[in-house]
Image (cartoon, rainbow, N blue to C red):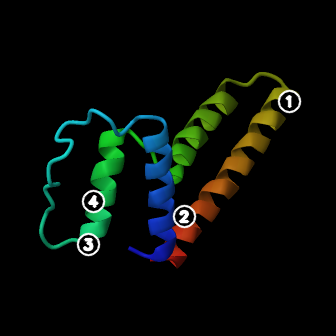
Amino acid sequence: MSGFLRRIFERHVERAEAEGKLSGLAGEGKPLEIEQGGDVTTEIGHKVMAEAGVVPLEVTLVRQLAEARAAYGRAEGADEKKAAMARIADLEMKKNLAFERLRRHR
């Protein structure tokens, strides 16, 4: 796992710990089962984040973008459509930047 992804993962884990989301998880205190053949650090990170319900920024942005597009479809009037398009453009930019950061730090 690259240093960039490790920092993101650590930040998510620290936030989840501070919010108590990592307490009382199934298998707490037991070794993690890791599939062979993959990057162990990445596998552990994904497993811990999934069990804690921590969602990566990229996933959140994709979901928000889908919601914004649906809102555009429901928008009535030019002003409402314009505001919805601005939201979509903003989320597209954020999503593209987030994915570009991932690509650069692999």
At a point 44% along the width and 67% down the height, the residue shown is 6
Q: Position of residue 14 (x, y in %)?
A: 47, 50
Label 2 amino acid?
Phe
Please identify, in this view, whether the residue under mark 1 or under mark 2 is nearer the observer: 2
Of pointers 2 and 3, the one earlier in the residue sequence: 3
Estimate how packed mark 4 is, as few (under 14), some (14 to 19) or many (20 or more) residues with alpha carbons within 10 Å. Answer: some
**Picture quadrant of residue 82:** top right
Secondary structure type for disc 2: helix
**Which residue position is annotated with label 4?**
44
Of pointers 2 and 4, the one earlier in the residue sequence: 4
**Picture quadrant of residue 17:** top left
Secondary structure type for disc 1: helix
Estimate how packed mark 3 is, as few (under 14), some (14 to 19) or many (20 or more) residues with alpha carbons within 10 Å. Answer: few
Q: Position of residue 55 (x, y in %)?
A: 45, 45
Q: Position of residue 49 (x, y in %)?
A: 36, 48
Q: Marks 4/1: CA distance?
A: 48 Å
In the rendered structure, the answer to whether residue 64 lies left or right of residue 24 reads: right
Estimate how packed mark 2 is, as few (under 14), some (14 to 19) or many (20 or more) residues with alpha carbons within 10 Å. Answer: few
Q: Marks 2/3: CA distance?
A: 20 Å
Q: Position of residue 65 (x, y in %)?
A: 60, 42
Q: Marks 4/3: CA distance?
A: 9 Å
Label 3 amino acid?
Asp
Please identify, in this view, whether the residue under mark 4 or under mark 3 is nearer the observer: 4
Mark number, residue 78: 1
Secondary structure type for disc 3: loop
